[in-house]
Image (cartoon, rainbow, N blue to C red):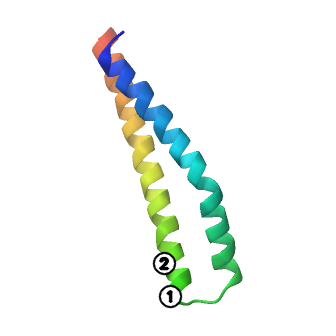
Amino acid sequence: MDILLLITIGFITIGFVVLTSMKKDMESKLAFITGKMENEETSAKAKSIIWWIVSATAWGIVSILLIVWCFHHNFG
């Protein structure tokens, strides 16, 4: 089996597990933010939610690029 394929599968699997494990925490932070008025604690929680969204987007883009690269490398 090609090492690039193993890296791609591992990256996607580990990333998916990490994102789904953090999902519950992000939902509770969002519930806290929507229930409270603006203060420093809600601002910090909002920033962590924004960074989670940014990291999930980056993970998705890198996963797509790895899949394309893997197919191009193996079948191109």
Tell me which residue sits at (32%, 12%) in the image: 2
What type is the residue that disc 1 sits on? Glu
Quarter-of-image position of residue 42 = bottom right
Q: Which residue is mark 1?
A: 40
Tell me the element at label 1: helix
Q: Residues within 10 Å of mark 1 (few under 14, many from 20)?
A: few
Tell me which residue sits at (65%, 57%) in the image: 24
Coordinates of residue 8 in the picture (x, y in percent): 39, 27
Q: Which residue is mark 2?
A: 44
Tell me which residue sits at (71%, 81%) in the image: 35
68 over 42 or under it: above or below = above
5 over 18 or under it: above or below = above
Coordinates of residue 16 in the picture (x, y in percent): 53, 40
Tell me which residue sits at (48%, 68%) in the image: 48
Coordinates of residue 27 in the picture (x, y in percent): 65, 63
**Residue 55 falls left or right of residue 20:** left
In the image, which disc is placed on residue 72?
A: none
**Residue 4 falls left or right of residue 54:** left
User: Is the Cβ of the residue at disc 2 closer than 8 Å to that at disc 1?
Assistant: yes
